[in-house]
Image (cartoon, rainbow, N blue to C red):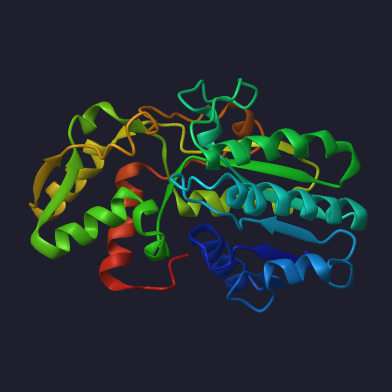
């Protein structure tokens, strides 16, 4: 591929993994983030100078916290910026692959054309941009929105409360050989998708510009938080402490997610990483701190 790739959110969890993979594969990449070579709003200001027709913009930068309660902040960072970026891409005939979220579904169903039921401001902002962006499918060479489910893997140490349970369990186990699990966690089932698989899907769309639209980005299998805890117990013989769910999460915590993969599997048929394999690989990474994960 001879076109340039512009990646926003390169210091974020998913963005950093995409950046590392693209650099290993020798793609021409420009990094956009608040701590990177190009700042997000500088990118908009200099877009016409930097981006050429046919270039690819991968937009992962966002306010990703599901507990932020400032609607103006979330709207500015997640909708307004994305809308301005889309307009620039249309004007320059550039391609746009952006991060949506499975949180737009609320309690489901989890299929792309389902009625969306966002439960928080983050989910609402993603839902709004999905609806907006798809109005311009015929005005842009390619536009893809990927609805990420529960992504886990290396480089999420900065996410704190938003980090995956795998990351949290690892550090809890390391501290006192005990992991904390919400009560009734066997009844909370999520579609956990390994970061390798997310990068694979993004690379598919980079290399197949004829596809546009909204696509689920999940494993297609639902596992409970208890299932992940059991992997730790089997590997480390650690203890489980069952705790109450914080009141701020009650009513806003999805009890079940499961990516309907019919649409994405029609064009991308690669098998996804199993929960056991993905969690094991991630634990090995956390133990060894091996940056060369691909």
**Count of residue discs:** 0
Residue at 43%, 45% in the rendered image: 67
Residue at 47%, 48% in the rendered image: 68
Residue 105 position within the rendered picture, expressed as x and y whole percent measured from the top left? 53, 28
Does any portion of residue 223 appear in the rendered image?
yes
Horizontal side of 276 relative to 148 (left or right) equals left
Q: Residue 266 appears in which quarter of the rendering? A: top right
Q: Residue 244 appears in which quarter of the rendering? A: top left
In-front residue for pair 108/97: 108
Residue 3 position within the rendered picture, expressed as x and y whole percent measured from the top left? 81, 65
Residue 150 position within the rendered picture, expressed as x and y whole percent measured from the top left? 43, 43
The residue sitting at the bottom extreme is 37
Residue at 15%, 50% in the rendered image: 179
Horizontal side of 180 relative to 121 (left or right) equals left
Does residue 129 lie above or below 164 as drawn? above
Horizontal side of 257 relative to 147 (left or right) equals left
In-front residue for pair 32/141: 32
Does any portion of residue 2 appear in the rendered image?
no
């Amino acid at each position: 591929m001879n076109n340039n790739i512009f990646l926003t959110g390169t210091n974020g969890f998913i963005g950093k993994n995409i950046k590392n993979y693209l650099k290993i594969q020798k793609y021409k990449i420009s990094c956009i983030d608040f701590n990177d070579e190009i700042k997000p709003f500088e990118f908009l200001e200099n877009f016409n100078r930097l981006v050429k027709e046919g270039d690819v913009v991968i937009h992962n930068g966002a306010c990703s916290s599901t507990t932020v309660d400032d609607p103006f902040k979330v709207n500015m960072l997640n909708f307004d910026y994305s809308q301005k970026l889309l307009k620039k891409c249309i004007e320059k005939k550039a391609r746009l692959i952006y991060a949506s979220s499975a949180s737009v579904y609320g309690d489901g169903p989890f299929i792309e054309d389902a009625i969306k039921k966002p439960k928080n401001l983050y989910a609402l902002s993603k839902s709004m941009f999905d609806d907006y962006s798809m109005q311009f499918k015929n005005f842009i060479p390619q536009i893809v929105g990927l609805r990420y489910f529960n992504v886990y893997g290396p480089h999420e140490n900065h996410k704190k409360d938003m980090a995956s349970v795998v990351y949290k369990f690892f550090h809890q186990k390391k501290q006192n050989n005990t992991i904390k699990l919400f009560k009734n966690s066997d009844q909370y089932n999520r579609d956990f998708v390994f970061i390798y698989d997310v990068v694979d899907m993004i690379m598919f769309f980079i290399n197949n510009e004829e596809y546009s639209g909204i696509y689920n980005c999940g494993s297609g299998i639902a596992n409970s938080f208890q299932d992940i805890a059991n992997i730790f117990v089997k590997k480390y013989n650690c203890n489980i402490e069952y705790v109450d769910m914080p009141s701020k999460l009650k009513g806003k915590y999805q009890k079940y997610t499961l990516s309907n993969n019919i649409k994405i599997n029609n064009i991308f048929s690669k098998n996804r990483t199993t929960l056991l394999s993905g969690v094991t690989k991630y634990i090995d990474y956390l133990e060894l701190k091996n940056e060369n994960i691909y």
